[in-house]
Amino acid sequence: MDPYRIWLSEVMLQQTQVQSVIPYYSRWLKKFPTLMSVAATNEDTALKLWEGFGYYSRCRNFLRACRIVVDQYGGRVPDDPIMFRMLPGVGDYTAAAVMSIAFGRAIPVVDGNVRRLMARILTRDIWGSKGDRYLRSWLREWIDPRRPGDFNQAMMELGSLVCRPRDPNCPVCPVRSHCRAYATGRVGSFPKRKARRALPSREAVVGIIRRRGKFLIQRRPPEAFLGGLWELPGGKLEDGESRDQCLRREVKEETGLEVRDARYLGSIQHTYSHFRVTIHAFDCRYGGAMPRRVRVDNRRWITIKQVPRYAFPRGTHKVFDLVANHRGRIRR
Ligand code: SF4
């Protein structure tokens, strides 16, 4: 088995359902059939392939890690768990999955499915890093040293397909005779459900700042949320601030440009993993001289037809849809 492909699949499967992963995985492998080809690409190309998939730090870290593998390990994924764990974006889960499946190392995987399955088998609620250590101590005893990859995948599949969160299929479960929750009639009591907190809401303002049939976009800083993706200038609405004031302040702070003739286009809503945002979009022009910082590498003037060349967050794509609906009404 190709460690690169296994590693890629495990990175993509973090926080993501298999069905969502499949098209991205296929597209990625078509473009980058080898680890060397990933290492040789640039971040924009990689992020464009990842666009819409979310958790973009996975993509940036994978790219960085592949470059390190090429530079330091001659392009071969290290089979030493300590070396592999030191690569960007590789945590306990990814390290255990790749080491066991690709290299046959007896390291147990702990993910959400395994945690739930084990909570029921052991009738014990297992949370946090202490809980994971406790789980691993059990799993190290049970893992099959001859087929650790199969064992880990079987545990994850069992949790996902049989010991499901809401309606575990106990009658067909192959580990039913070992399950304390089943034996004591307490399947519904494990794991204890944590109350879900409502997602916080934010409001933001963005500007379609126009110049000679083009508009301005900028790249988000690499360390920021959605880092490396492109966006429209703008930002979060402060307390007591009007949308118009926010637009002027944010654009000035980010680009040095003075917004003129701002005209409200409409608003869109988008939900990210940890917050909801309402984005108010404005069509506008700018006044005064073009500051030097607008011409640097992380900003571009593009036409609407050039949008597909860049990777944008989903929320920004919704704004582009809004713009497309207003096309006839926007000043050129
Ligand atoms: Fe889960 Fe039921 Fe199997 Fe126990 S018997 S592990 S609760 S599916």
Image (cartoon, rainbow, N blue to C red):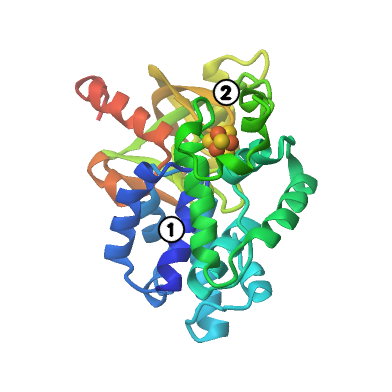
Disc ID at residue 246: 2
Q: Residue at x 50, y 45 (%)?
A: 174
Q: Is residue 114 visible?
A: yes
Q: Residue at x 40, y 74 (%)?
A: 40
Within 8 Å of ligand 1, the CB of disc 1? no
Q: Residue at x 49, y 81 (%)?
A: 76
Within 8 Å of ligand 1, the CB of disc 2? no
Up-down: is 19 above or below 276?
Answer: below
| Image quadrant, ligand 1 | top right
Q: Residue at x 36, y 74 (%)?
A: 34
**Could you tell me residue 282's position as x and y percent?**
41, 23
> Disc 1 marks which residue?
9
Q: Earlier in the sequence, mark 2 or mark 1?
A: 1
How far apart, in angstroms, are the residues tagged by discs 2 and 1? 41 Å
Side of 202 relative to 40 (left or right): right
Q: Secondary structure at mark 2?
A: helix
**Could you tell me residue 154's position as x and y percent?**
49, 53
Q: Quadrant of the N terminus?
A: bottom left
Amino acid type, mark 2: Cys
Q: Are marks 2 and 1 in contact (CB under 8 Å)?
A: no
